[in-house]
Image: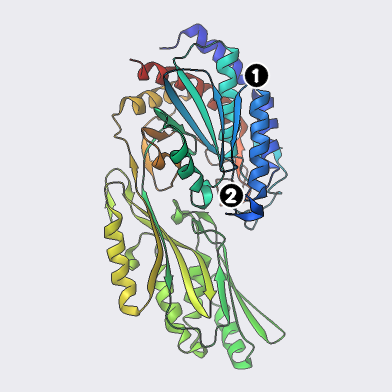
């Protein structure tokens, strides 16, 4: 147990970091760092490379040993020892999307928040962990473990970065991944992504597209139709009675736009899927003929977020119900392609999901392609490390410290003996519904929680180090 005197010093250090935490996080938020595989002659593009350069520069400025691993990822390390405690952050962000009130890449400090893309997912973790490692040195805290901070570059777009890390680097003895909510995420659902390809080309629809990423509930989707007067009249009449649908005509082209509400694929019930709204609307337009059947099938598969209409609905006690979205729709060579993202319970297997998909799409002639299955991560709630982290969080914050399972996917699923531990914020106050959390417009971090996180991680590293050498 940490002494009262050391706890007081840690508290003073964390409070003293507040200004620097905001400054450093603002520096990283200003860098647009959406990952693009292979862009600009770099593993994940220039934006993420710029963010990594800056993070490593900050780490070196705080006296840490910094290393750029070919722009696949970066490392900052402190101390020596026969064991390693890993801290895992990522610098890439999801695309900014729509409906921002404030500028995505001009960080704004307002009402106790820092607003900007990446402020809570996940540049906050990179900054806080650097200050934690700096604090270990400045406070003279003796450890038997080396501390290694990972800066990831493609967490949002496939996690090729962590796969490279696992190939090249020794596995930490225990890892904390600050890319979830507090207290402790001791399990992550399996993530299965795939594409469903329609075998029949559009007959009248000239294009249909929506979404920016497969793991984000899309807030916008658009279809274009030929500018036939009768078709235009029918579409306009139907739009007057439809949810989230608008119609425009210009130069002989009818454009139908659906507007929904974005959300993370792990929490799809908080969003409204614009792709579904558009498909459902088009399936009711009689003038579209055979295209209605295509839209109707695709609309049915997206009509719930628990996989019931895909024939894959399952649940378990630790993690609850399977969830599913279609995050992207596209027209490829005149045919509809739907991108799906499934989060299945920790005690189930992807093979059962795959069988359900084939039973749904196969009889209709649709092909399931590019299927990827990322297996669940799960440590029992009574694991000693899980229990210790829960205790520390509860004592520091006075809040409920019950561990939980998520539908999201973090680096923890690629590591051994790892958990998610913070530090996404509670829903920020003062922002409209659908704004403020990870992947939402006006993503925001509560600044006081940055300070609390420094304290929590310092105490946690001390106690985990002791457990590793018990």
Task: Say which element carries label 2.
Answer: loop
How far is disc 2 from disc 1 in space, using C-alphas?
37 Å
Residue pictured at 62% horizontal, 46% vertical = 431
How busy is the neighbourhood of tag 2: few (under 14 within 10 Å), some, or many (20 plus)? many
Residue at mark 1: 16
Q: Quadrant of residue 249?
A: bottom right
Which is closer to the viewer, label 2 or label 1?
2
- Say whether residue 22 is visible: no
Across and down, in percent, residue 232 comes to: 61, 87
Q: Are marks 2 and 1 in contact (CB under 8 Å)?
A: no
Residue pictured at 42% horizontal, 83% vertical = 293
Q: Quadrant of the C terminus?
A: top left
Q: Quadrant of the N terminus?
A: top left
Residue at mark 2: 43
Across and down, in percent, residue 289 comes to: 47, 90
> In the rendered view, would you say 263 is above or below 170?
below
Depth order, front residue of 442/456: 456
Across and down, in percent, residue 180 comes to: 47, 39
Across and down, in percent, residue 348 comes to: 27, 51
Give the mark, 2 or 1, whose residue is nearer the N terminus: 1
């Amino acid at each position: 147990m940490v002494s009262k005197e050391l706890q007081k010093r840690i508290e003073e250090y964390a409070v003293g970091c507040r200004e620097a935490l905001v400054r450093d996080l603002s520096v990283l938020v200003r860098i647009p760092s959406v990952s693009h595989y292979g862009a600009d002659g770099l593993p994940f593009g220039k934006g993420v490379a710029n963010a990594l350069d800056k993070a490593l520069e900050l780490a070196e400025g705080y006296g840490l040993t910094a290393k750029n691993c070919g722009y696949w990822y970066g490392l900052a390390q402190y101390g020596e020892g026969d064991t390693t405690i890993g801290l895992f952050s990522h610098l890439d962000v999801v695309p900014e999307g729509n409906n921002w009130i404030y500028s995505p890449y001009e960080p704004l400090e307002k009402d106790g928040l820092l607003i900007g893309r990446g402020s809570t997912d996940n540049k906050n973790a990179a900054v806080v962990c650097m200050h934690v490692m700096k604090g270990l040195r400045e406070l003279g805290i003796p450890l038997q473990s080396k501390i290694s901070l990972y800066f990831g570059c493609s967490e949002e777009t496939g996690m090729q970065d962590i796969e490279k890390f696992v190939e090249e680097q020794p596995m930490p003895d225990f890892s904390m991944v600050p890319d979830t909510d507090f207290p402790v995420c001791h399990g992550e659902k399996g993530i299965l992504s795939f594409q469903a390809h329609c075998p029949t080309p559009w007959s009248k629809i000239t294009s249909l597209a929506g979404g920016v990423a497969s793991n984000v509930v899309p807030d916008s989707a658009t279809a274009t139709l030929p500018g036939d007067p009768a078709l235009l009249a029918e579409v306009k009449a139907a739009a007057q009675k439809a949810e989230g649908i608008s119609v425009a005509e210009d130069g002989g082209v009818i454009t139908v736009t659906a507007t929904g509400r974005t959300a993370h694929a792990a929490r799809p019930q908080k969003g409204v899927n614009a792709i579904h709204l558009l498909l459902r609307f088009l399936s009711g337009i009689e003038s579209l003929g055979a295209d209605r059947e295509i839209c109707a099938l695709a609309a049915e598969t997206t009509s719930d977020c628990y996989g019931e209409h895909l024939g894959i609905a399952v649940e378990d006690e630790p993690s609850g119900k399977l969830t599913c979205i279609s995050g992207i729709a596209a027209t490829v060579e005149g045919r509809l392609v739907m991108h799906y993202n499934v989060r299945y319970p920790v005690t189930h297997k992807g093979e059962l999901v795959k069988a359900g998909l084939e039973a749904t799409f196969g009889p209709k002639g649709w092909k399931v392609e590019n299927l990827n299955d990322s297996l669940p991560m799960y440590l029992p709630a009574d694991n000693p490390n899980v229990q210790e982290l829960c205790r520390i969080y509860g004592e520091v914050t006075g809040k409920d410290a019950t561990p939980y399972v998520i539908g999201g996917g973090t680096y923890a699923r690629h590591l051994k003996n790892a958990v998610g531990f913070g530090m996404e914020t509670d829903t920020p106050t003062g922002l409209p519904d659908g704004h403020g959390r990870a992947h939402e417009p006006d993503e925001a971090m509560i600044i006081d929680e940055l300070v609390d996180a420094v304290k929590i991680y310092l105490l946690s590293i001390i106690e985990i180090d002791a457990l590793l050498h018990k």
